[in-house]
């Protein structure tokens, strides 16, 4: 299998081609730096994403609070995580970096507030 990945590690935005099957990588080409090779290999085998969104609050003046995952989540779990988040209503007050959802979808990763609501 061949996959083209645009590297986001630095501003160069290299178009990197990774060839392999599953976790067995045969070749990585198109990267200018070593960091691009590492990024593309990880993206090929186990793609992850930081999830940023909002959660409803119980405050009428501030009905939503911005949130994000503490660490990158497995890409295949992002939509499942969004289903859980859609059902949440956070109780105010909320401080920056308060954990609003613990261990989302059994990933071991928390969803934290990136804003405050009094």
Image: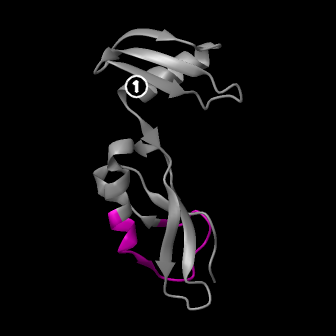
Rendered image quadrant of residue 62: bottom right
Which quadrant does the N terminus fall into?
A: top left
Q: What residue did someone put label 1 on?
A: 44
Q: How many marks?
A: 1
Q: Residue at x 50, y 48 (%)?
A: 50
Residue 116 % position (x, y)? 64, 73
**Residue 104 visible, this orientation:** no
**Residue 41 visible, this orientation:** yes
Which quadrant does the C terminus fall into?
A: bottom right
Q: Nearer the viewer, residue 1 or 96?
A: 1
Residue 15 % position (x, y)? 57, 22
Find the magenta span and give its range.
Answer: 83-99
Q: How is the image coloured?
A: one colour
Q: Nearer the viewer, residue 72 or 78?
A: 78
Q: Residue at x 54, y 63 (%)?
A: 67
Q: Residue at x 31, y 57 (%)?
A: 80
Residue 88 % position (x, y)? 39, 75
46 vs 70, left or right, is left
Q: Secondary structure at mark 1?
A: helix
Above or below, 16 against 65 in this view is above
Rendered image quadrant of residue 9: top right
């Amino acid at each position: 299998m061949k996959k083209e990945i645009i590297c986001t590690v630095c501003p160069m935005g290299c178009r990197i081609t990774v060839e392999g099957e599953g976790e067995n990588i045969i070749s990585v080409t198109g990267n200018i730096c070593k960091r691009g090779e590492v990024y593309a290999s990880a993206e090929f085998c186990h793609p992850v994403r930081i999830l940023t969104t909002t959660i409803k609050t119980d405050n009428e003046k501030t009905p939503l609070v911005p949130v994000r995952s503490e660490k990158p989540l497995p890409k295949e779990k992002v939509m499942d995580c969004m289903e859980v988040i859609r059902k949440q209503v956070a109780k105010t007050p909320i401080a920056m970096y308060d954990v609003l959802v613990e261990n989302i979808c059994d990933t071991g990763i928390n969803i934290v507030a990136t804003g405050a609501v009094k």
